Amino acid sequence: MTAQNLLVELFVEELPPKALKKLGDAFATVLADQLKAQGLASADAVVTAFASPRRLAAHVTGLLGRAADKAVSQKLMPVSVGLDASGQPTPALLKRLGALGADATAVAGLKRAPDGKAEALFFESVAPGVELAAGLQKALDESLAKLPIPKVMSYQLETDCELPGWSSVNFVRPAHGLVALHGSSVVPVKALGLTSGNSTQGHRFEAAVSPVVLKDADSYAATLLKDGAVIASFAERRAEIVRQLAAAAAKVGGGCKPIEDDALLDEVTALVERPNVLICAFEPQFLGVPQECLILTMKANQKYFPLLDAAGKLTNQFLVVSNISPSDASAVIGGNERVVRPRLADAKFFFDQDRKKTLASRVEGLGKVVYHNKLGTQGERTERVRAIAEWVAAKIGADVEQAGRAATLAKADLLTDMVGEFPELQGIMGGYYARHDGEHADVAAAIADQYQLQRDHTNAANLISMTLDIADRVETLVGIWGIGLKPTGEKDPFALRRHALTLINRFELLGLASSLGAGHMQLQLSSLLDFAKQQFKPGLISAEVCTELTEFIYDRCQNRLVATFKQRVEVADAVVSMRPPLHDISARIQAVEKFSKLPEAPALAAANKRIGNILKKSEGDVAATVNEAVLIEPAEKDLFAAMQTTVPAANAKFDAGDYTASLQSLAALRAPVDAFFDGVMVNADDPALKANRLGLLKQLHDAMNRVADLSRLVA
């Protein structure tokens, strides 16, 4: 058989929609990889995956009918073991050859080759290439075994000659058909109790013929579309839905656009075989309900696409992706409108009922909601967050009373009917209810922002939002970490890594606001962690929690700089290793990057490393004091004189927050530093002279490392 394209399709009952794309990609990828590994397909063979609600398929180009024969060299044993002193084969060698299907006549053809310190015997043979049927069977078995099936089901085969009614199969869904075509020829393979053929099924209701007979591998997609009314490609079906959604929105007019949601789009693509987008509507009276509630119920429960107007407001029209295309779609439209109405009515009922009680009246009920069996109730947690929020507010210049009020009410919407039905709306509904209750606008915004900010790490609506977010996260970090539930490996069930990264972001935003004249930044990580720890019952939180969390947060910061912002590892290490205030890190990184590009930077960084090593090896702590009268060498006098002007200037720039200018000021020290190490013996025999020179280096080291540890810029 010559090289031809291959098509394999497994026809099944409706597959789980959220897993369909992954299943389709995995089926095609593993199948092709196995065929390539067996030499039936070339390394550059093109693989096309197909996945629809009722089928997984793969098209692979250039499949051979039989793989090429392969030369095989097998190591047998050392020569000293395989041949005796007279060169005759030993029983051990003959036994090994027999296992390979050879006999004593093969001894003369054995190859000798070095193997480490000894010489070994090798048996060379030619392994016949695998036939396509056998190779495809192996590849198909492997592909099915490695499918990322979310949940396996067991079902009985329809017929079994040996044990009728007793043979069962475990798979994601019952399988009813198997196609395997090499060009136009059927490849005889079996899977899940099925035997391969050249026919499949099309659309449940709209296929032109049944079964759909496939002429050859290359006509698969076109034949399914023409005779089966199925768009087999997941990507093409998705693109068609996007096109139809845009066309339907344009037909509605008014600048309307369907809501953007890739997860919903993927799920709907996995629910239909040939999409047909229809325009539906609901009663305008429901628009009085917060649009987040309506959007969520339409997306989550009905898989509809709500339409937003040009201003981003929800309209009373929505789009349905139907799996049928009747000439008169009124019945389909009417049916979907009837289905969505009770859902929207429920949302309106919940909203109306919830507003009959204020958020403040629900706070007491949080004392009956368990937060964690060791950390107490949501009520206790609310008190801790409130205390932290008020403390943070005082540090960053926010309104302390409003911060405390926002923290007190933040979790109260957990007890509302709407959040009970739609947990995804927690915080959002709290914001609506707070505004309805007449709470301050910043308080309501902070309540609404608390979960939104978890998804958007770049902005906070106001200082009260920022305060509540910091308090909530640091309470979580200290509490969860403090009772021993630290992240391990890839496991982080309480998302402490995400909390740490967002906390870092909050400090950066506050530092930016401070630099722009929005007040002085007084919030420090160490004091924040310590205050948060004090809000828990004595003895509940581990004593080391603040130290451990500090290291954890700075580690996350360094990883983030390298992974997210593509910062050079040595630059990130130089800054973060100094454990500077979190809000200063970004400015210091920029300063070190600019400094590292100066021609003087490599020499100064190397000198800094040398100084650090000298100071480490000295006995006891070195005092940063210098007696000018003890300076005797010209080079040390010159360095001391240069430092008298350069270091104060660098310190002044540092104190003013101009880290770039501070580091660049130090560039003037390169020449005197180089001259010092060329002409001065630091470890002099005279103890007073040695101590004075060490003091000079200590002063220089302290001045050079205020912004970052410059020694880390060199290997």
Image: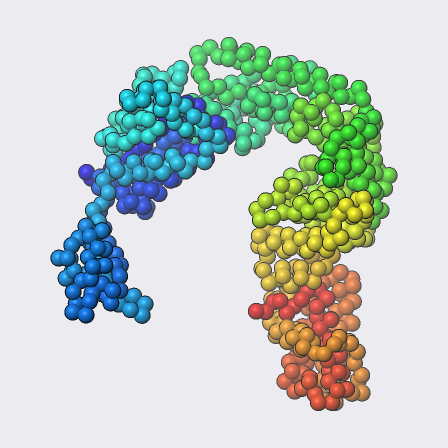
- Can residue 376 be seen here? The reply is yes
The image quarter in which residue 359 lies: top right
Outermost residue toward the right in this view: 401
Q: Residue at x 70, y 68 (%)?
A: 705
Q: Residue at x 79, y 47 (%)?
A: 539
Relative height, residue 327 to residue 236 (above, below) = above
In the visual, does 553 lie left or right of 319? right
Relative height, residue 499 to residue 624 (above, below) = above
- Can residue 406 be seen here? The reply is no
Find residue 439 and report its horizontal and vertical position in percent. 83, 30
Find residue 529 and report its horizontal and vertical position in percent. 76, 50
Find residue 649 and report its horizontal and vertical position in percent. 77, 70
Q: Quadrant of the N terminus?
A: top left
In the visual, does 241 lie left or right of 460? left
The image quarter in which residue 177 lies: top left
Q: How is the image coloured?
A: rainbow
Q: Residue at x 71, y 16 (%)?
A: 349
Q: Nearer the viewer, residue 318 or 262?
A: 262
Outermost residue toward the left in this view: 105
Q: Nearer the viewer, residue 130 or 650?
A: 130
Q: Residue at x 20, y 52 (%)?
A: 98
Find residue 566 and report its horizontal and vertical position in percent. 57, 54
